[in-house]
Image: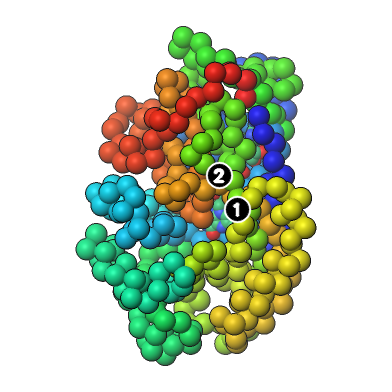
Amino acid sequence: MRKLDLRTGKPVWHAYRSSHINETALTRSLTTDVLIIGMGITGAMTADLLAEDGHDVVLVDRRGSTLGSTPATTALVQFEVDVPLSRLQKTIGAEKAVRAWRRSRLAVGNLRGRIETLEIPCRMTERQTLYLAGNVLSGNRLRDEAEVRASAGLPGRYLTSGELSSQFGIDREGAILSHGNFVVDPVRLTKGLLLQAQTRGARFFAPEEASEIRFKKSSIEVTMRSGNRIEAGHVVLATGYELMDVVRTDRHEIISTWAIATGRQAKDRLWPGEAMIWEASDPYLYVRTTHDGRVICGGEDEDFQDEEARDRLMAKKTQRIVDKLRRLLPDIDPTPEFAWAGSFGTTPTGLPLIGPVRRRPRLFALMGYGGNGITYARIAAEVVRNKLAGREDTDADLFSLADTPMSRSSSG
Ligand SMILES: Cc1cc2nc3c(=O)[nH]c(=O)nc-3n(C[C@H](O)[C@H](O)[C@H](O)COP(=O)(O)OP(=O)(O)OC[C@H]3O[C@@H](n4cnc5c(N)ncnc54)[C@H](O)[C@@H]3O)c2cc1C
């Protein structure tokens, strides 16, 4: 079992208050319908939907709620998958690629609806999204991408360089302007969902580390490092980038990423509509604002997981992000008040891995989230809910772990 140093530095979410979640140590062994391991955004979304369906749900976390990767996220909730639709079609086929993009859009809409219904005070704000031409898709390719998206029924309009400059004051070869995405405070969202699940009976135990998994005929027994056991009808691994050894990782790679947040900007220094911005580049830069006018900017990803190397690069990466931000949006003051780095899981297709582990139908793994972790967490929660309800999820095949080998070892 891996324990990673998931993030360093100070994420901007530390600046804002959030609810307190009551978590206690596990003092005895217990049984439940569903055990969810991990109390980040993925565990919280899954707990919310399963508790709503009437399942008895228990969550454990080795650190505590929202203490993993979740507070590192910059929380742009987008339907756009990291791999452009025109590219994804070439790797997994047109039908599957379109289905994956549409499911992603549906998940963003479903999550928005859920937050509204539950009135979670997570500062959800709808934003347009600008996808700027870059070294992955230049102007002409970006125009083609806009056409492919339009023929799949997905929103997005190509802006020429002139339109981009006159409407947003940004100097690039072109962009796709889309709508339907939003930003949130991820810590408030996670805690809001956990509190909702708690009102429906969900129980939280932390710090508790799941260390061993034993498969029984009609249940799974998970032993905590403390020695207590939880026997569950189903177990959901919502452990983020720390995969338990029970699932092998050959389709999933951990990389490193950096982000900053500036001080509060005067409103007239911000760009029209405070649209979310990201680039068709590798590595890409992305930008959003907070409710109180800070600018969050992240990117500069590197293909390594070594946490010491990641942290050594902190000052250099922060400066590079500041320089890029200044070039992109010359009217704002890019001086960072917060800077942080985190680990990040990616897959070659940009799609997550979600579903029952091979030959272990009672064990679900939710992983490989890339830049769309929040959107994919919602898809994961829906796939698990449908499976437990015995409903067919017609997109589950897109994210299946079916050909991901399971370790022979049953220890976590
Ligand atoms: C800098 C950065 C920017 C990002 N920006 C975005 C963005 O703009 N939009 C977006 O959608 N996504 C973004 N992401 C991705 C997003 O942050 C993640 O996908 C998401 O937070 C993962 O949530 P999670 O609940 O799966 O994992 P986590 O929040 O890491 O939760 C997993 C939990 O499992 C616990 N755990 C692990 N193993 C065990 C065990 N054996 N026993 C008990 N508990 C265990 C951990 O302690 C942890 O709390 C970003 C990520 C980073 C690092």
Residue at 53%, 29% (x, y): give it: 247
Q: Amino acid at mark 1?
A: Asp
Residue at 42%, 90% (x, y): give it: 166
Give the SS element for disc 1: loop
Q: Which part of the image, by quadrant, shows the C terminus? A: top right
Camera-side residue: 157 or 77?
A: 157
Circle 2 crowding by C-alpha within 10 Å: few under 14, some 14–19, many from 20 = some
Callout 2: CB less than 8 Å from ligand 1: no
> Does residue 153 appear anywhere in the picture?
no
Badge 2 or badge 1: first in the primary sequence:
2
Camera-side residue: 298 or 320?
A: 320
Residue at 24%, 59% (x, y): give it: 152
Camera-side residue: 266 or 301?
A: 301
The residue wearing badge 2 is: 253
From the viewer's perspective, is residue 136 above or below residue 4? below
From the viewer's perspective, is residue 50 above or below residue 194? above
Circle 1 crowding by C-alpha within 10 Å: few under 14, some 14–19, many from 20 = few
> Separation of disc 2 and disc 1 at Cα?
8 Å
The image position of residue 234, as x and y in percent, is: 48, 23
The image position of residue 407, as x and y in percent, is: 54, 23
Residue 303: numbered disc = 1
Q: Which part of the image, by quadrant, shows the N terminus? A: top right
The image position of residue 229, as x and y in percent, is: 64, 17
User: Within the image, what quadrant is residue 52 found in?
Assistant: top left
Q: Are marks 2 and 1 in contact (CB under 8 Å)?
A: yes
The image position of residue 251, as x and y in percent, is: 48, 39
- The scheme the figure's colours follow is rainbow
As drawn, is 392 to the left or to the right of 134? left
Q: Amino acid at mark 2?
A: Glu
User: Within the image, what quadrant is residue 288 found in?
Assistant: bottom right
